[in-house]
Amino acid sequence: NTFDRALVRVMARDGGNEGVERVASRGSVDGADAGDAVGAEVRRRNPQEDARDEAKGKQCVAWERAGPVRAGSSKDVQWDGVDAGRSPAGKRGREGGVEDPEKAEETVKLVGSMSHGIQYVYDLDSKDESNNRMRGLPWSSGLPGRGSKDADEEVDYGTLDLLLKARVMAEGDSASTSEDVDGRLGPSQVKIDHNSSSGDLLWDPTRLKIESRSNFSSARANACVYKGKWMYEVTLGNCGIQQIGWATIDCPFTFEEGVGDAPDSYAYDGKRVRKWNVSCHSYGQTWATGDVIGCCIDLERGEISFLRNGESLGVAFTDVRRAREGLAYFPAFSLSQGEKAELNFGGRSFLYPVPGFRPLQGPATEQAAQADYLLGCLRRLMQLSPIAHDHSSLLPINFAYQAFDASDVVLSCGLVAKHLWPLLRMDYVVSTVFVPFLLSMLSPLEDLSNVPYFANMFFPVLEEFETVEVVGKLFDSLASLYKTSPFTSTVGCTPPGYRYLKLALDLMRIPGVFAAWKAWPSFYSQFELFLTQKQPNPNDLATLLPEVWWPGADCKFSSEDAMKMQSKNIKKALETIEGVQFEMCMELLIYMPESERTIFEDFVLWLLQKNKGANRNVPPPNLSDPTVLNSVFFVLLRLLHCHLRTESNSADAMGRFPASIFVSDLSKELDLPRLGGTLAHVEREHPLECIQQLHVEIGPGTAHSESGSATHSLRKHPLDLQVKPVRQASFLSPQQLTWLFDVSLLLYHLSVADAFKAANTQNQAKLHFLSQLEDTERRMQRLDMKSGEMLAHLKEARKRFRKEVIESTRACCWSRIYLFRQQKQCAMYCLSNYACRLLLSLSEGKCSGSSDEGEKLFSYVPEYYVDSMVDAFHALRRAEPAFAGAKVLARHGLADAISFLVKHFADKRILNPDVRDGLLQSISVLLQYKEYHASFEENQEAREHMIPSLLVAFQERFWIPISNILVHLCRGRGFATKCSKGRDFQSKVFQKILHDTCKDDAELFSSFLNRLFNTLNWTITEFGVSLKEIKEGARRRQLAEHHQQQRKCTIMFELSVNLLRILEFFSLVLPEVFVQGPGLNLTRLCELVRFVLVHTAAGPEGRSFEERVSHISNFYSQEKLTRGTVLAPVAGILINLYRAELEAQAEGSDHNSVLVCLSASDPVVESMDVLENMQWSKALSAEPQSLVNIRFLSELARALREQEKDHTGCTTVEGGMDTDEDVCTICYSAMADTAFLPCGHRSCHQCISRHLLNNKRCFFCNMDVESLDMS
């Protein structure tokens, strides 16, 4: 009998040689004989007369459940009852039987009511034959039968201890298997073989978690298989390029080759959706972070297959070589830089086991069975405890037995814990037995959960180090199980990962358990795993959203209502998960250790230090999952939301912002750049000794006073509603609130911004594919049904575009639920607006110190304040559906945002040009929309500062965004403009301001015009060069390089058109600058016009324009790269100049001749023919109103032809020249009538004037020019 054999082994270990000999002398271990031997030995070792210990056992304080302790010292942990693990009786209960008979006083006798249910608790009254045989033992008289009420009978603790040992051993023996492990070679504990690795791999002490720190790193396990069926699992730390599979020892690992790149080497790569064996082929599904990949090898059939989250991907490889001497397959892995994975060879239970396939590391099934029995004992003990009888409980109460006293519970629990604790140190036992046991105690109703009762019964009887280890391994298993749980949204069901989060939360709310977990070395690493959110890939989204609908979709195949219902289910599931995550963070926030910071603050600091390089081009290793940072960010938003409203004033907790946060320890450690440069530079250039005492005064903002000017709908926007503060945030100090605000901006900068950018990219992809689908369907409707081949091609294209639309619609739906829920949007906008108000106050020097100190303080602000503020605003603006329009935002800080943008894009205090460029880009984007455009026109700061600052900033490197802004402001006044939205967006306010500014400040406009001419010459030249390179190098250029060159060509073309439109506007509103001003302006403008015409309309290059552009028509819209697009502003310039000349002639005023300047080269006349014959309405869908002056183009062309007959051109030098020395050696078209001083070199006045616009040195000798001599 299994139990008999276990009992003999127990006596051999604990009963002494004498007892073993007495049992052996019987020749068998049967019935009463065995009982005599064991009972006599027990009586010898445990005397019954120790009444003193009995009295001590009675001293245990009655166990009653107290309210949870939420604050206090972490050193003096108070459980929800007595500290039984530290009491004398509790300690004896843990230690169990006494090894030395000399120490009989350490034995504790179980007396009183405990004896009445002992058989039930330890499962000794079952009908199992092995248990019934124990009833014949002599000492079984001390175990009363069912329902006995005799309180005078005693049970010896040592007897019970030996009995429990035997039962535990028997349970293990029953579960043990003699399975043949033939077919495997290697150590029993399987892990990474560090000697086999190549590249730069980082692994943890267990050598089961790996991360690559080089371009390509590979490694093998330390065990191999040569026959049979085997498997292992890989949990993906991220979803990049990894090749996972099997390889022989002969497979070479290098920096370029890994698993699957050699014969007898097989791998699966879910990033590229390929299988690898020397060559690659399509296979499997796209994988996602947190996926569990099962790798199976069947050496009986010669097949290798893979699974993703338990779903078979099919057989990947067949005819795998086997049955050859020396041929064995190792688990092998290759990872690209930054990739992470966690390996499970059987040390933990497989999440998705495959029947028939064995783990490489034998599972601890014996120990699991033993732990299962012991946990069952504890479950039954709870049923007889005062808790089960006095409180509501999920466990059925067994009223057949009298309830135990509190001291009895402690002693019995200590006896079980003695045997259970060594088993709970094993990962396999924890994940297979302990976690399911605790999950069975959960309840949807929090008050009925038995987890706190069990924890307060079990953990206090453990030693402190034992509690820490058991709790640490428990949370490690829960975190791993949660992270790998798939996300589902079945109606009426919670996501699979919810129960692991709920169990972790219940355990955290027990002060003793939380203190033990906090003492575990991996506490922060484990806690961050609970904050992950598994992101679904296209296959997962197809399961979550089987019904997909979009405006214009065929109702036969999709339903809007069905998709809304699916989205609602996903939203509810996500809110459930995020709600528990928030509560877990709050448990950290309300736990107050001895230090000044909360545990939550310490965790956030640790998280920031770990991820401080997350936004670098080449990020460092060991970064957190981005969803962890996202989760913490939204937790902070939820805490801060009520304090970030636009209605906040100086009386609010965040009305005064401490400047000390700009020089905090965290700020210094991360060493992030400031608006004034590095922190060391700022402290040197702008010293502030009293910065720790300074506070910034933040007012309510300017938007609130404008609320009456906006028209509202009857239904208020969520931004207009009051927000109730979170209960846990009520005790946060102003210093803590501002610190959390600072951290939230940093988290957004490090990770959250990328998530919103990815969501915007998905939305743009959806719009693009939807447009392609609609265009394909229109073409199919127009196509003649006889065109069979073309129709088939269009059907295939429609099928492809429809698939892309469906996938992108699902991705956008997930982003809308995960990122753009209304509560999150409101809180994020309040965060952005508060940051804007803070920056405005800092810029204006509104601080508690002097104005000089306030001015200096602005340079200390980290750059991520500006970046996060601007990016968060645009992320909400791009949301689909839109978060709020400009009219709603006008009541909540839009005016502040506009004021900051227009005042600081040219602010010299911001040293980083990229930051100022971002502000300019924001203005450029907002001006494209009518509502925002109107807000700019209504803003006083924009009317006063924007135009002059734009003209000044154009002198620097910002001419690309500034040209876009000026084009938006000038729209509606050009020749052959499109009908779309030109007149609706015409900005008469800013056009008048632009006209007045340029007219009043001649020096500023002259400098701007010079830069404009120079930039246009460069962009036109670059465009022509790019076209030539694309044509000549298309065949030999790599594809990526070819696309990059095409993109550059398109950018240069669009930029040239924008700059020409700006010149066209100035030639319209300020023609006197060219016609009646300095002749140099008209000369340069005409030269530029001729230059454009030569490249696009006349000459060899101009005539082949369409043919050269056709090389990039496959990649970019042909509507942009057309001859008419670039010639329209040129035609407008010519019309404006000619009209101005005619007006000057009519008035009789002096003017520069446009005809003379234009007729300097023959291609101009040829180009005029192209301009005259252009069908502007058809080519550009031009608005008729923009073509009313087209007749002047014909008149100019006719005048040029007549002048061409009478004159030889502008290149003829007028007046005789005595010698060659009198000719300007720069242009050879004028006399050298001006000299540089003091060097004396001579040239014509026009060439020298043009040169001095950009350079103040002589272009002959490079000497500084002091003056000019025109004598």
Image (cartoon, helix red, strand yellow):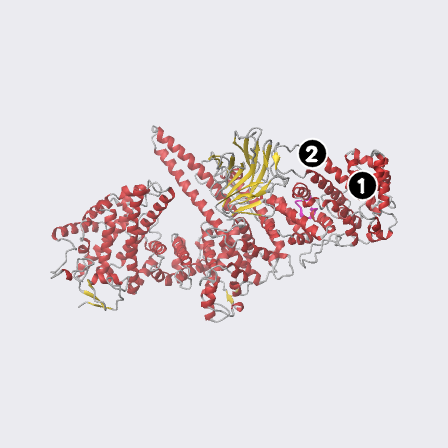
Crowding near the residue tagged with mark 1, few <14, some 14–19, many ≥20 C-alpha atoms within 10 Å = many
Residue with the mark numbered 1:
11
Q: Is residue 505 magenta?
A: no
In this image, 287 relative to 1056: left or right? right
Rendered residue at 34%/29% (across/down): 787
Q: Nearer the viewer, residue 862 or 950?
A: 862
For residue 362, what is the image quadrant? top right
Where disc 1 sits, the SS reads helix
Q: Tag 2's secondary structure?
A: loop
Callout 2 crowding tier (Cα within 10 Å): few <14, some 14–19, many ≥20: few
Residue 741 location, x and y as percent? 53, 58
Q: Is residue 839 left or right of residue 71?
A: left
Q: Residue furthest bottom?
A: 850
Horizontal and vertical percent for residue 600? 60, 56
Q: Nearer the viewer, residue 588 or 1222?
A: 1222
Q: Is residue 859 above or below residue 44?
A: below
The residue tagged 2 is 177
Q: Total number of numbered labels?
A: 2
Which contiguous range is marked in magenta? 441-450
**CA distance for labels 1 and 2:** 24 Å
Instruction: Provide residue 899's location: percent of width, then percent of height.
Output: 42, 61
- Left or right side of 818 for 501: right
Say if residue 461 shows up in the picture: yes
User: Which label's residue is closer to the chain start, 1 or 2?
Assistant: 1
Q: Residue 569 sits in which quadrant?
A: top right
Q: Nearer the viewer, mark 1 or mark 2?
A: 1
The kind of residue on which mark 2 rests is Thr
Amino acid, disc 1: Met
